Image: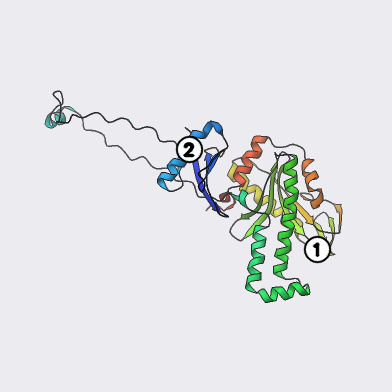
Amino acid sequence: MGAWEVQRWRRYGKDRLYVHGADGTAVGWRDLLTGDDHVDAPERIGDLRAAIDQWLATGDTVAGDAAAPRAPLAPSGAGGPGPDTPLASEADDEAPAATPELPVPTPAAPAPWDDLASHRAGEMAREQAVALKQAAPVRTFVARVLGVHTDERAWRIGADGEEKVAARLEKLATKDPRWKFLHAIPVGENGSDIDHLVVGPGGVFSLNAKHHPGARIWVRDNAFRVNGQQQPYVRNSRHEALRAGRYLTAACGFPVAVTGVVVPVGADDITIKQQPADVVVVNRMALTSWLCSRPVVLEDSTVEAVFEAARRSTTWRPQH
């Protein structure tokens, strides 16, 4: 059997054990609530069950090779040494002193990680909106009735926009299952997140959803205006993509280029005079066709490797 890594995931009332090989490929997982096994690599079902059995025996995350069978102990007579066994004093004179065995260092277990594939679109923004509403329920209610723009509204509208973009990505995956995506990726230690990360044959893209119901949007190079007001969306998207590329490159061990995409949602009018040099602005309704039209730049194996790295929460934390 090969090396493996076992990770427990508990969220939304689910309790699972995921098993990955040393190269990051998915072996399978077990539902700890039902006991059912779900096999991703049928040829490694033995690894899946052995890894889970070892985890259940230790009650913790494990990593390493399958234990080699122990060498059998030499049989000993019930009544003491046999006729050809030297006495202790003779053995001391004739046999050299045994070299003491050095302890074998135990490999460090991998850092625990959350599977970001379970995150819902707009999850972090929705949590912020709910927290603000719960902190001031009366003020929030009055602001909604009067149509006042508050932080609670901004987070709530933002979450709605991310959910609308996610619906387009679902259609993309239906058209071409090679495309994969993640939502609400927490990045760094300052509470920032990536709305959507898309990985497929056409490349790797960080999507920033911008929900402006009924607005007029005008774009020329780095200028992005909403109802005539300049917004830093292009600059922020550029920074987000560069940072995502650094994290993914470090996790994958090979260069990963990420393209930033600003996705307007709900606008009544979008005018793009000139696309930014290194960021793309794509209306939500055109997102699926735009991604499908990208030239193929990544092999299927590379898409899988990048997605496996991206779905691990530890990929997006600074290495201290």
**Mark 2 neighbour density, 10 Å: few (under 14) some (14–19) many (20 or more):** some
Q: Name the amino acid, label 1.
A: Gln
Q: Quadrant of residue 216?
A: bottom right
Residue that mark 2 sits on: 49
Left or right relative to 76: residue 14: right
Q: Residue at x 65, y 66 (%)?
A: 130
Q: Residue furthest top?
A: 84
> Could you give the CA–CA distance between mark 1 and mark 2, rounded to whole angstroms?
56 Å
Q: Name the amino acid, label 2.
A: Arg
Q: Residue at x 21, y 30 (%)?
A: 76
Q: Please state which of residues 117 and 195 is positioned toward the viewer in this rendering.
A: 117
Left or right relative to 204: residue 251: left
Q: How many marks?
A: 2
Q: Please state which of residues 10 and 154 is positioned toward the viewer in this rendering.
A: 10
Instruction: Say which label, 1 or 2, has the lower sequence index.
Output: 2
Q: How far across and how far down the image is residue 98, in percent?
A: 24, 33
Disc 1 versus disc 2: nearer the observer: 2
SS label for mark 2:
helix
Residue that mark 1 sits on: 230
**Mark 1 neighbour density, 10 Å: few (under 14) some (14–19) many (20 or more):** some
